[in-house]
Amino acid sequence: MTVDGKIKVCPHCDSSELRRLTRDARKSRTHGEKDRYYCQDCQKYCHDPVRREPYRKDRGAHVGLSRRLIEADPDDVGGIHDG
Ligand SMILES: [Zn+2]
């Protein structure tokens, strides 16, 4: 989650299941290397993830969708506004 509320997602499959691969922070800064990300959904690597507003489906998308819908908590939508 970033300051403006946007999340980083995979440019290949639009998944939010990205993991930043941090190697040596100091080394990275010295050489100006970009962070590398690994997508757990499509198993691809990328340097420039897409930044977008988070979708509701981004949360627990892999954990039984139908059950998630039944257990949907009204308070969960707080903070997300259209426009
Ligand atoms: Zn992906």
Image (cartoon, rainbow, N blue to C red):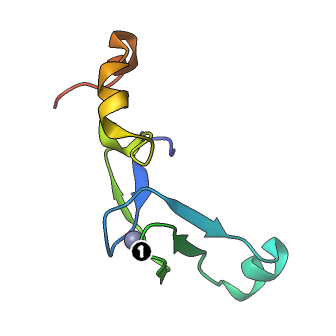
User: As displayed, is residue 32 above or below residue 56?
Assistant: below
Residue 72 horizontal/vertical position (percent): 34, 20
Q: Amino acid at mark 1?
A: Cys
Vertical side of 49 occupied by 70: above or below:
above
Looking at the image, how many numbered discs can be counted on the residues? 1
Residue in view at x 74 percent, y 77 percent: 29
Residue closer to the observer: 28 or 76: 76
Q: Quadrant of ligand 1?
A: bottom left
Residue 21 place in picture, x, y as percent: 67, 72
User: How far across and down, in percent of the image, does residue 52 sit?
Assistant: 31, 52
Along the horizontal axis of the image, is 46 left or right of 56? right
In the rendered view, would you say 44 is above or below 58?
below
Mark 1 Cβ inside 8 Å of ligand 1: yes
Q: Residues within 10 Å of mark 1 (few under 14, many from 20)?
A: some
The residue nearer to you, when weighing 15 against 34, is: 15
Q: In the current view of this chain or complex, which residue is farthest to the top?
A: 75
Residue 54 visible from this viewpoint: no
Residue at image location 77% in from the left, 77% down from the top:
23
**In the figure, is residue 26 to the left or right of 29?**
right
Q: Residue at x 33, y 39 (%)?
A: 65
Query: Residue tagged by mark 1?
Result: 42
Furthest toward the left, the residue is 83
- Residue 57, quarter of picture: top left
